Image: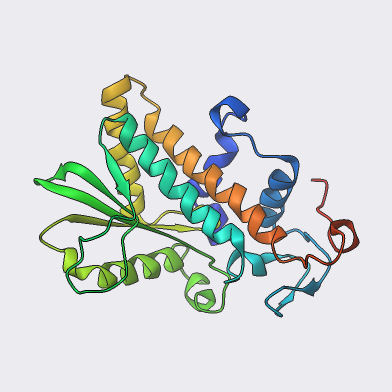
């Protein structure tokens, strides 16, 4: 309830549902998104491909490590950030090599090729966490953005070697659509640059809506991915016709 009460969690509800803008959710994605937001039953209880038990609310898929939707959601969010930066004439590279000096295989999600702030290039790393997984349940019961804040804190520690050479911004989201302050600040600044470039005063709002749409679209893929391949979908699954 704390998460869905946050203003930004409902940004996708204000987006113009136009296919030409990439903002149109298909029927299943819309029903699942509304069902998750309302806490309505989404499916019959069943066993996930990971052998975990999935209840009637279907939320296990939002954090299941075998869920293809998690990877799709991560890629979609990064692509949206990249596209909007490029539209501001700020060239970027996703998953850049060679910027870390500790001989590790970890890579941030993206980097700008020109300075972003204080003469330093922007480096960002996106994370989208499920507040209902066991790791975050206790903290999220008291604070709406606890999960995103913790995830962003871990990102800062992970990329501490970038300090001084780059301007690093962890971009933390929750599957319910809430943003961490660092993510909100970055999206606002990108939206401001878009406004200066295009003259559209609602650029920041449109960007938040697009990111929110990306999250909701791939949340539905996460829920659907918990079903086994061996059975027909209609045998185990139904979505409330909300």
Query: At 17% across and 48% down in the image, what residue appears?
Result: 121
* Residue 240 seen in this snapshot: yes
Residue 125 vs 208, above or below: the answer is: below
Residue reaching furthest to the right:
235
Residue 190 vs 126, above or below: the answer is: above
Quarter of the image where the N terminus is located: bottom right
Residue 234 left/right relative to 159: right
* Residue 200 spot, x, y in % from top left: 36, 21
* Residue 143 spot, x, y in % from top left: 45, 67
The number of numbered badges drawn on the structure is 0
Residue 233 left/right relative to 211: right
* Residue 35 spot, x, y in % from top left: 72, 53
Query: At 76% across and 65% down in the image, what residue appears?
Result: 227
* Residue 191 seen in this snapshot: no
Q: How is the image coloured?
A: rainbow
Residue 175 left/right relative to 48: left
* Residue 233 spot, x, y in % from top left: 84, 58
Residue 133 vs 96, above or below: the answer is: below
- The picture quadrant where one finds residue 157 is bottom left
Quarter of the image where the C terminus is located: top right
Residue 190 left/right relative to 58: left
Query: At 56% across and 34% down in the image, what residue appears?
Result: 14
Query: At 23% across and 57% down in the image, what residue appears?
Result: 168
């Amino acid at each position: 309830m704390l998460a869905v009460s946050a203003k930004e969690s409902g940004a996708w509800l204000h987006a113009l549902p136009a296919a030409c803008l990439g903002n149109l959710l298909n029927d299943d994605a819309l029903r699942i998104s509304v069902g998750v937001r309302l806490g309505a039953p989404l499916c019959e209880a069943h066993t996930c491909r990971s052998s975990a038990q999935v209840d009637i609310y279907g939320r296990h898929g939002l954090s299941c490590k075998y869920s293809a939707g998690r990877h799709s959601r991560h890629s979609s969010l990064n692509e949206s950030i990249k596209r909007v930066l490029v539209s501001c004439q700020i060239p970027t590279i996703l998953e850049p090599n060679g910027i870390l000096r500790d001989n590790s295989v970890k890579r941030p999600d993206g980097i700008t090729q020109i300075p972003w702030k204080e003469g330093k290039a922007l480096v960002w790393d996106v994370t989208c966490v499920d507040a209902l997984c066991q790791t975050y349940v206790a903290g999220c019961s008291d604070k709406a953005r606890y999960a995103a804040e913790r995830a962003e804190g871990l990102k800062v520690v992970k990329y501490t070697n970038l300090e001084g050479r780059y301007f690093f911004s962890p971009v933390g989201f929750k599957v319910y659509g809430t943003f961490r302050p660092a993510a909100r600040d970055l999206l606002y600044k990108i939206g401001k640059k878009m406004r200066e470039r295009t003259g559209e005063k609602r650029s920041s709002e449109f960007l938040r809506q697009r990111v929110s749409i990306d999250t909701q679209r791939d949340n539905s893929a996460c829920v659907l991915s918990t079903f086994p391949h061996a059975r027909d979908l209609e045998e185990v699954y139904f979505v409330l016709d909300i």
